[in-house]
Structure formats: structure tokens, C-alpha cells
Image (cartoon, rainbow, N blue to C red):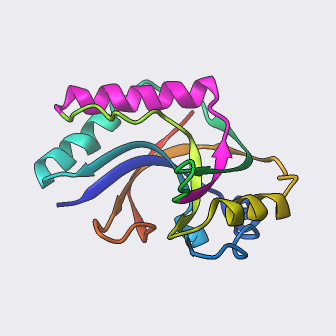
Amino acid sequence: MPRLFTGLEIPPEIGLALAACRGGLPGARWVDPENYHITLRFIGDIDERTAQDVLSVLGEGRRREPLPVTIDGLDTFGGGRPRVVFARASASRDMSELQAEHERLMRRIGLPPDTRRFTPHVTLARLRDASPLDVADYFAARAPFPKLTFTAARFVLFSSRGSVGGGPYVVEAAYPLG
């Protein structure tokens, strides 16, 4: 069964700038820069027939213009027990509409809704037993965060191996914007 998700690729020059944030945080397992992306819709582990339906229905989506993306800061998921450090992407109206369309398309082919709130981000590290103080120190050492901008000319369907979080991710199909 493939594990699939849709997303936006991070250009190499933006990946290089984000990679400068690596290091200096005990308990962090850093994502390789070539695996940086912004997830639009996590699909999960599905059978081959459903994977073919996903490939097909994504090509039926509304034609959209290239998407401006701004990465504007560092943040964490997990609250008092931080488990992920990420670079926050602004949720522009265009990006939110594209994500909502992916959600509608996946539901149309019978997949259950994604119950998580859409928070556009680039995962930089997964944390094991990192203290909130260490995370706060890490953020302070990297402030101020420079705004990084790019234009996404396509979205892609990625696959990954189920038990390995953090890649490697493979582009299974690409869908142009514009």
C-alpha cells in the first residue's frame, strides 16, 4: 500500500536557507533538506486502486495560477511537550483554497475527511524528549527569522514509506499551476 499526500515542493535555494536552521537542539532528528515540503492533504496508506483514483481526480481540479508562498517564522507542534519544529508558511487565500479543493476531491472518491486543521508548514525536525526551555533557546538563537518567499508553479502527489517519518519522499505525479 502506498502512503500518499499532496504538497508543494520547496525550491533548493529556500531549502538551503531553511537548512541553516539545523542543529543546536538536543533530541532533534533533522529532516533532510531534499525532503522539505508543505503538505496540502495527507491521504495515508491506501490500496493501488484508490491510488489510481487519487491520481485521476487530482487532474480534474480547478485550474489555478502559480501560488506565492511566504515562510515567515519558526514554531512547534506539541505545546508543553514539543514534538516537531517547523518553519511556518503563511496560509494565503490561494493556498487555503487549493488545500480545501484537495480535501473535497479526496472525499469525492470516498476517503474520510482529514480532521486536522490546515497549518501550512515545513517540518524541520522531529523531537524526542526535547525540553520546552531548549526549544525556546533554539528559537531565540535564530531570531529574527528572515522572510523567505517563492512561487509554487505546481503541486505534487508524494509517496513515502509508512514507518519512516521524514522521507525519503517520491514525486508520483505533478500538476501544474497556471
Q: Is residue 15 visible?
A: no
- Along the line of sight, which residue is nearer the eye, 58 or 111? 111
**Residue 22 appears at what percent x and percent y?**
69, 72
**Residue 178 appears at what percent x and percent y?**
57, 33
Q: Is residue 23 visible?
A: yes
Q: Answer above or below: position of 103 versus 28.
A: above
Total numbered labels = 0
Q: Toward which corner of the image does residue 9 lie, by quadrant?
A: bottom right
50 sits left or right of 37 in the view = left
Residue at 54% across, 38% down: 119
Residue at 57% across, 51% down: 80
- Along the line of sight, which residue is nearer the eye, 2 or 163? 163
Residue at 30% across, 29% down: 105
Please identify the quadrant where the N terminus is shown. bottom left
75 sits left or right of 36 in the view = right
Q: Is residue 92 found inside the magenta-colored segment of the image? A: yes
Q: Answer above or below: position of 46 versus 164.
A: above
30 sits left or right of 21 in the view = left
- Along the line of sight, which residue is nearer the eye, 174 or 2? 2
**Residue 86 appears at what percent x and percent y?**
61, 55
Q: Answer above or below: position of 31 versus 152.
A: below
174 sits left or right of 86 in the view = left
Residue at 19% across, 31% down: 109
Q: Is residue 21 found inside the magenta-colored segment of the image? A: no
Residue range in magenta is 84-110
**Residue 44 appears at what percent x and percent y?**
27, 50
